[in-house]
Structures are given as structure tokens and as C-alpha cells.
Amino acid sequence: MANVLDSEKQQQILALGRLGWTLRRIEQETGVRRETASHYLKQAGIEVRPPGRWGHPAAKPAIEVFTDPAALERATPGEEAEVSVPTPGRSPTDSACEPHREWIEEAVRDGRDAMSIWQDLVDDRGFTHSYQSVRRFVVKLRGESIPEAHPIIQTAPGEEGQVDYGDGPMVRHPESGKYRRTRLFVFTLGCSRKSVRFLTFRSSSKIWAELHERAFRRLGGAPRVTVLDNLKEGVLEPDIYEPTLNPLYRDVLAHYGVTALPCRVRHADRKGKVESGVNHAQRKLRGLRFESLEEAQAYLDRWETNWADTRIHGTTKRQVAAMFAEEKPHLLPLPVEPFRYYRYGDRTVHLDGAVEVDGAYYHVPPGRIGQRLRVQWDTLHVRILCPKTGELLREHVRQKKGYHRMRDEDRPSKTPESTVRLLSRARHAGESIGRVCQAIHRTDGEIGIRRILGVLSLVKRHGAAAIEPACAMALEMELPTYQFVRRYLERQPPLPLSLKQVDPLIRELTHYRDRVDRLSEGEIHEHD
């Protein structure tokens, strides 16, 4: 068929056909040819009424064209919807929208469509006339456009959901006090076209995942597949055959039993149902301003309940709420426990065989020095994973800043080659420097690698000539620590806490006990 009508025109023809109008009368009122109207009516299974003949009484005409979705849903095929609209006491040539012309013209300038204008007229201004009167009025102001036709993807109930972001209304930000454009999150079920919409000021991988959880809870279940675009919150590296998903997003979906299916790059038609849902809401919210995000979300929820869910969908020819009631039992049940969110990142294994997270150090199995590993952490645990296979290498309890966590099996049986080279560098820098680094390694093991690197960094910064006397003093005082060397360079007495880092055998030496106590009390000066 050459002529492709938009969903609103198709809905109007089907409504008039259910009311028993003849094809001739439908053509006169809508401007659509009888052959085109007949095709849509037969395709929807609506009986086409034959025209009246001379000498026979005229058929009973419909009272008024009315596109109330609830009334049309109650009407069975072949039965007229018992809806009557009072005829206004005005001239037939005047539009019922004339009293609201200024408001409608402003809404049209803001880019809003006829359906959203009619809905606000009914909700806020007590408009009692049909949608068609508003549509004709808007068409005269703006003109009519025919959308491009696209293929329809059929999905089983509970099988697929589609998700995307759009532009929300302008909302006053609570911190800056200025109006900011919000982001519109839309999740649409593929079978019933039921949509869930939320507004947010910003987006991140965690917010993106939390919005999915809110959508699943509002729907009362989760679909088996989620089709999404290649935005960074969901897909880290787009690829035709093997895209790399955001790990947090992937784990949240796995918690609910959902599989992510990213679209191919520049092929957004694969998720055309949610694209339509985004455009549907954007036309409704265009040009509106709200004082708070809660007020905007309440307005969106009211429109979702009163209009979006009760509409007759142009493709399915059924009410969205009725189809969702049939699809809801096919959704996956929600898990009992909520998902435990975490932060993630990549870390390099240091020379001491540990990775750093928020100033604390967590060791990995031997043989991975210099490798980049994936790390996940929350308030309780730190998990270290292999970047290629996703295998869990180690899971540690969170530590305070500056502390280490190491399992006994992770301690190397012999000194690693990298540590041997590090100690060799220290010996070449100076005799006392090498002895201090050897003492640190002997006392602290692999954990002391970072302290040895600290001593070598002081050598690089101040020179070996300045560090050698400091290390000699540390050996004389039986305090071969990085803290002592650094404090000596700063011309300050070392803190008493550095004694805790000294080997217990050193503190038992009676020869230096008095000098250490006097040093902590400030009785011995640097020149002594």
C-alpha cells in the first residue's frame, strides 16, 4: 500500500469504523481515501459498513467522534462506544479551541504535539471536546507531517525490554538554584509497550544501574533480555560480535537474571519501541518547567497513569495497560536480596606484590608483579580479579589507610628477582643506604618494598651524600627505618611511634635503651 498513515490517523479511522461510520463519511471527515481506510479497517478485523441505497432509510449516524481510550477499550468489535459529547452552543464554523488559542499557540511554539496539548487542556482547563478538534486546530497552526515507516519487531511476553536516555524538562537545581535540563530514563517492554520513566540530573554507571532496579521494582518483574544503546554507562567498548559491558551494569543485570543485548553502532532502530517511548514523553514535557525534581516526577507519573497507560497503541490496536496486565505474569520474579553495589577500577601490582585501594595495600598471588588487574571494592571487602577470565584471585577485608592484607600462601618462598635488583641498587647508592634497606627487608619482608623505594626516592631527591649520614645514624641508633631517615633530613627528632617498627630484639638491647628514651624526650640533640 502506497499511503502510510501515522498512528493518530490510524487510531481515528479505527475508532470511526467501530462506531459504524461508512467509508464515504470517514473520507469526508478525515480526508483519507476510502480504499486506504478500508485497508486499515479490514486489517484490524473491523467490518466495513456498506453505503446506504436510494429508497432505504439512512443508517443511524454516530453521535460524535470521541477518542477516549477507556471507552474504545470497553466497546467490543461491531458495537458502538456509548459516549456522547454535548454539542457546544457556538457557530459550527468556530473551533472549540478558540478560547485557548494563546495557550495552544505557545505550546506549539515550544514544540509540543496535539495529543499532549489536548491532555493538558482536559486535565488543567476543563476542556470537554474531542482530541480531533485540538488536532485540526494544531494542524492549521503548524501543518501535518507523515513519519517514515519502519518494520515491527514482535517479541513474546516477558522476553524483551528496551532502555534509553532522552531529554527531560527544565527543573530548578536545588544547589545552584538555576534551571537545568534533566535526563529522561525510559524502560519499555517489547510486547505490551508499557514504559517506566524517571528523571535525574546526572548519570553514572551506578545511577544507570539503580534506575534499572527502580524500573524492575515498578514493573513487578524483569524481562529476560535488555536492549540498550552503546552509552558508556552500559557498554565500555562497542563491538559487533563481542562488546565489553560495564562490569557493574553487567553484575546488576545478572543479579536479576537479565541478559544485556547492545545494539550495533549507528543501528538504533533495533530499539525503536523505547525510541518511540522517549519521543512520546519528550513531546509531552517539551517547554515545561518545574521547581523541583519531585514535582516533575509526580507530573510525569500522573501523565503515565492517566494517559500513556490508557491509550490505544497504534501498532497493537489495544490498550497498553490491558496488554501489560497480560505480560506481567511472564516477567522474571525479583530476587529477595538487593544488589550490593561496589566501586571498580584497574590497579597495577607493585613490586611488593600488592595493589593499592584508598591508601591500603592488598596482596595478590605471587608471579603477577607489573600486571594490571581488575579490582572491586565496597565498605566491607576488596575483590581482585583476572582481567581476561574474570576469575576471583583474592578477596580481602577492607583495611585502614597505610595497612596491608596478605595471606600466608602469598608470601614468596624466596626473594623475587625484582627485590634482589632493588637491594642491589641500594648497595650501589651507599654502604649505609644498602644496610638500611637490607634491614628493612629483613624485618618487614615484601611489605617493606615500598619503604625501600621511599629511601631510594630520598636518594634521588637529595643525593647519596646527604642520605648516607642519615642512614649511618639510623644504624647507630638501631632504628633502620624510612621514617628515621626522613625525619633526620627534616632536622626533627623521630617520633616515638617509629619504635613500633623496629625489630623487638633491638628494643631489648640495654646498651641503647637510655639513649632511645632520652631521644623521645628531646634531651639529646642532633649534634650529639
Image (cartoon, helix red, strand yellow):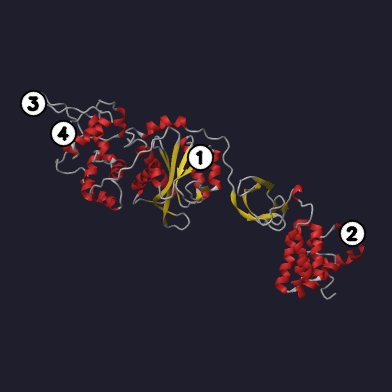
Which is more N-terminal, label 4 or label 1?
A: 4
Under circle 2, the secondary element is loop
* Viewport quadrant of the N terminus: top left
Under circle 4, the secondary element is helix
Residue 352 visible to an observer of this rendering: yes
Q: How many residues crowd mark 3 within 10 Å: few (<14), some (14–19), many (20+)? A: few
Label at residue 259: 1
Q: Does residue 490 sit above or below 363 in this rendering?
A: below
* Viewport quadrant of the C terminus: bottom right
Q: How many residues crowd mark 2 within 10 Å: few (<14), some (14–19), many (20+)? A: few
Q: Position of residue 42 (x, y in %)?
A: 25, 30
Camera-side residue of 296 and 81: 81
Query: Disc 2 vs disc 1: which is toward the camera?
Result: 1
Q: Does residue 216 sit above or below 526 in this rendering?
A: above
Mark 4 highlights which residue? 24
Label at residue 508: 2
- The type of residue carrying mark 4 is Arg
Query: Disc 2 vs disc 3: which is toward the camera?
Result: 3
Which is more N-terminal, label 3 or label 2?
A: 3
Q: Position of residue 207 (x, y in %)?
A: 51, 48
Label at residue 54: 3
- The type of residue carrying mark 1 is Thr
State the CA–CA distance, disc 4 to disc 3.
15 Å
State the CA–CA distance, disc 2 to disc 1.
63 Å
- The type of residue carrying mark 3 is Trp
Q: Residue at left 85%, top 57%?
A: 504
